[in-house]
Image (tube, helix red, strand yellow):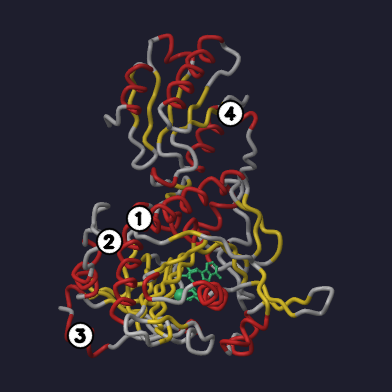
Amino acid sequence: MRLSRYFLPVLRETPAEAQIASHQLMLRAGMLRQEAAGIYAWLPLGLRVLKKIEHIVREEMDRAGAIELLMPTLQLADLWRESGRYDAYGAEMLRISDRHQRELLFGPTNEEMITEIFRAYVHSYKELPKNLYHIQWKFRDELRPRFGVMRGREFLMKDAYSFDLDEEAGRASYNRMFVAYLRAFSRMGLKAIPMQAESGPIGGELSHEFIVLASTGESAVYLDRRLLDFEVPHARIEYGGDLGEAVRNWTGLYAATEDVHDPERYERLTAPADRLTARGIEVGQTFFFGDKYSVPMKATVTGADGAERPVQMGSYGIGISRLVGAIIEASHDDEGIIWPEPVAPFGVGIINLRPGEEAVDGACENAYDALDRAGFEPLLDDTEGRPGGKFATMDLIGLPWQLIIGPRGLADGVVELKRRAGGLRETLSLEAALERLTRGKY
Ligand code: ATP
Ligand code: MG
């Protein structure tokens, strides 16, 4: 992408309405625009990151055996009357009526709809287990939308739903999602710690919130700090096998959100030096709630013995749009964002210090072509403007690498390569710089 043709409305000033770093930086970096309280337009740079996150989540869901579909944003109120949640959900639900006065709602979550789909088609244990997911916009009329995408009213969620014949199989499905979550967050450069959690309006007994520690997080959490050094399961983990051990490993040490925190247990299980009280951002939550929806909604399956029973369900959410903010909270400095490579909107920024000068333009074009071919997704700053402004913009938008090409360097046969994280700079020939980037030799 060439910056001269792109749409990157960066702001030099920090907008007064934004209180936390991620919100400020998303506005300044031209990623996001507020259209109403808690409702945002995703500008091109922001959308690229959102898509990268979505892609990682999709890959890990698919790897774990979940199957993607797409449900609508609008749902019939009558569907929610079947489960009894239409009245119980309260003011957070956006209720709408159409021209025939049919009552609709903008979905805050999809347990009812997926149960309705499941019961229409699946009747036998032979078709189980099944895990269906989608990535779709949700609406919750939050009392206090704030912190930008962290607590929006409209937000993008990945939500998966598992269906099993009995509780044991249901727990195995839960474990597959648990492992997939560990992997997905880690691939985004995040340490998300699974913590015992309250299940809230979704219901059920077994639930974990996946929490990224950050001083601006909304939840207070208590954990054994050794969890921060745990390794996540490898991509080749056998999802068909027993994942109980991997899950027990991660849940063996104390970690709980304030709603379920038990000080006595915490102190018994965790040595004083290992205790960590912190704040955190909830980036995902897993629930196993058995027959909470399948009983009232009559979603039953016939077992091998011929008897019909309510299907055992779990649901699993990831806040895709919140993650954009969470990653920035975890990775930024005074100059701007520092994207972990797998979610960076572009892999490298090429800065042309003298557009219009033939040798510099030529070197930039060569670099652009080579990096584009190597799948680096370069962003070439080919705009007129002072070097200081160009450096500031590149630091602000936080691409992992900067390749700085100017007339003085070229006269000596060199360019500059800068790593955004840590700020290390190197002066070397263009060939050596390209070689280093494309061969991963850094
Ligand atoms: P919270 O406690 O933060 O209100 P929740 O527990 O109500 O969230 P879930 O029903 O567990 O949310 O939704 C799954 C995921 O969706 C959450 O883990 C979170 O990452 C994301 N999410 C929930 N509400 C919002 C919101 N208002 N804005 C952005 N992301 C959200
Ligand atoms: Mg939650």
* Residue at (41, 83) in percent of width and height: 289
For marks 3 and 1, the one nearer the N-term is 1
In this rendering, which labeled residue sits more in front, label 2 or label 3?
2
Q: Residues within 10 Å of mark 1 (few under 14, many from 20)?
A: some
- Which tag, 3 or 4, sits closer to the chain's start? 4
Query: How many residues crowd mark 4 within 10 Å: few (<14), some (14–19), many (20+)?
Result: some
**Res 95 → quadrant:** bottom right
The Cα–Cα distance between marks 2 and 3, rounded to whole angstroms, is 34 Å
Which residue is painted at 38% across and 87% down in the image? Answer: 307
Q: Are marks 2 and 4 in contact (CB under 8 Å)?
A: no
- Going by the image, does 224 lie left or right of 400? left
Alpha carbons under labels 3 and 1: distance apart = 38 Å
Foreground of the two, 426 or 176: 176
Q: Secondary structure at mark 2?
A: loop
Q: Amino acid at mark 2?
A: Tyr
From this view, report whether residue 442 is shown above or below residue 88: above
Q: Position of residue 3 (x, y in %)?
A: 59, 31
Q: Are marks 2 and 1 in contact (CB under 8 Å)?
A: yes
Real-space CA distance between mark 2 and mark 1, rounded to the nearest whole angstrom: 8 Å
| Image mark for residue 63 | 1
- The amino acid sitting under disc 1 is Arg
> Sequence-wise, which precedes: disc 2 or disc 4?
4
Quadrant of the snapshot with the N terminus: top right
Closer to the N terminus: mark 2 or mark 1?
Answer: 1
Q: Which of 212/77 is in front?
A: 77
Q: Which residue is mark 2?
A: 239
Determine which residue is flagged by label 3: 267
Q: Indicate the secondary structure of the residue bearing disc 3.
A: helix
Q: Amino acid at mark 3?
A: Glu
Amino acid type indicated by mark 4? Arg
Residue at 30% across, 27% down: 439
Q: Which mark is residue 2?
A: 4
